[in-house]
């Protein structure tokens, strides 16, 4: 039996897939909500719909392959028609924190080059103000210690991400520093300040990038914002 959160994530992911039209190139997000969108896209491909994907992580590429979704790349496609991806937090202004799964850099590249970004999330991720969830920042391993110190001066508590005691390595060979800021009243300002620090490759703040947000609820219903 599925738990309530899974029901909410599945509802959001499947609803977002309904926006896909034949012939589209679609960004395949990363995480447990994007999983459901990718499953649905797989079913659509099985039914004969012409859909191609660009994956935002090695994990999503693997899932797409298992489901028979044809993958393309930026060598062949300059612009995606749509990108469907999850979130860690979505604000009422539709700003988003991403990167809980560590795929934020590829996720941002794919989102930036998509005509439309659809963010999918369970109802609990919709918040008045971002910042309760620590902000993931992808950093170059060289000098991460000084990058980390500099992050502190911006008023956050930074923590180098680890997985089973080992430093977490992204698909791009970088590290993630999770920055607990508390409330982020001005996401653009925080994003810009972070980008001024050498060694920071990308932040998990997706400021005014989402065109549409699909929220999934524990009763299986959805709301499109
Ligand atoms: C990965 C992400 C994910 O989209 C985000 O962490 C949400 O994950 P989930 O849907 O599993 O809750 O940004 O980098």
Image (cartoon, rainbow, N blue to C red):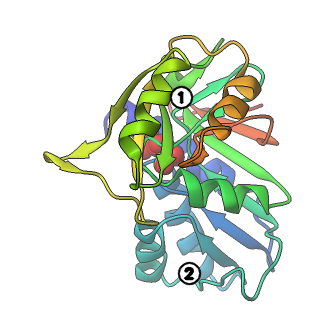
Say above or below: 123 vs 173: above
> Residue 153 versus residue 224: which sits nearer the camera?
153
Q: Residue at x 56, y 39 (%)?
A: 87
Q: Secondary structure at mark 1?
A: loop
- Tell me the CA gap for discs 2 and 1: 27 Å
The location of residue 120, given as percent across then percent down, is 61, 42
> Residue 218 versus residue 105: which sits nearer the camera?
105
Q: Residue at x 40, y 65 (%)?
A: 173
Q: Sort mark 1 into few (<14), some (14-19) or many (20+) by Cα contacts within 10 Å.
A: many
Which corner quadrant of the image does residue 59 belong to?
Answer: bottom left
Per the image, the residue denoted by label 2 is 69
Q: Which mark is residue 217?
A: 1
Q: How many marks?
A: 2
Q: Quadrant of the C terminus?
A: top right
Q: Sort mark 2 into few (<14), some (14-19) or many (20+) by Cα contacts within 10 Å.
A: many
Q: Which mark is residue 113?
A: none
Q: Quadrant of the N terminus?
A: top left
Mark 2 or mark 1: name the one nearer the start of the chain. Answer: 2
* Side of 124 relative to 97 (left or right): left
Q: Residue at x 78, y 42 (%)?
A: 209
Evaluate whether residue 218 shows in this view: no
Q: Secondary structure at mark 2?
A: loop
Q: Residue at x 76, y 28 (%)?
A: 188
Say above or below: 21 vs 134: below
Say above or below: 83 vs 46: above
Which corner quadrant of the image does residue 176 belong to?
Answer: top left
């Amino acid at each position: 039996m599925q738990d309530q959160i899974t029901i909410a994530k599945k509802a959001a992911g499947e609803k977002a897939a309904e926006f896909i039209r034949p012939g589209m190139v679609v960004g395949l997000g990363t995480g447990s909500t994007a999983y459901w969108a990718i499953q649905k896209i797989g079913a659509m491909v099985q039914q004969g719909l012409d859909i191609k994907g660009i994956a935002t992580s090695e994990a999503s590429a693997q899932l797409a392959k298992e489901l028979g979704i044809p993958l393309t790349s930026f060598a062949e496609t300059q612009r995606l028609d749509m990108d469907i991806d999850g979130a860690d937090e979505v604000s009422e202004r539709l700003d988003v924190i991403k990167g809980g799964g560590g795929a934020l850099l590829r996720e941002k590249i794919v989102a930036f080059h998509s005509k439309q970004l659809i963010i999918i999330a369970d109802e609990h991720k919709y918040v008045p103000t971002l910042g309760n969830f620590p902000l993931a920042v992808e950093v170059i391993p060289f000098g991460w210690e000084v990058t980390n110190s500099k992050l502190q001066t911006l008023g956050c508590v930074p923590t180098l991400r680890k997985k089973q005691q080992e430093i977490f390595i992204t698909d791009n060979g970088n590290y993630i520093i999770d920055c607990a800021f508390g409330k982020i009243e001005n996401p653009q300002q925080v994003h810009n300040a972070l980008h001024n620090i050498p060694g920071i490759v990308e932040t998990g703040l997706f400021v005014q990038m989402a065109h549409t947000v699909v929220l999934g609820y524990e009763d299986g219903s959805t709301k499109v914002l």
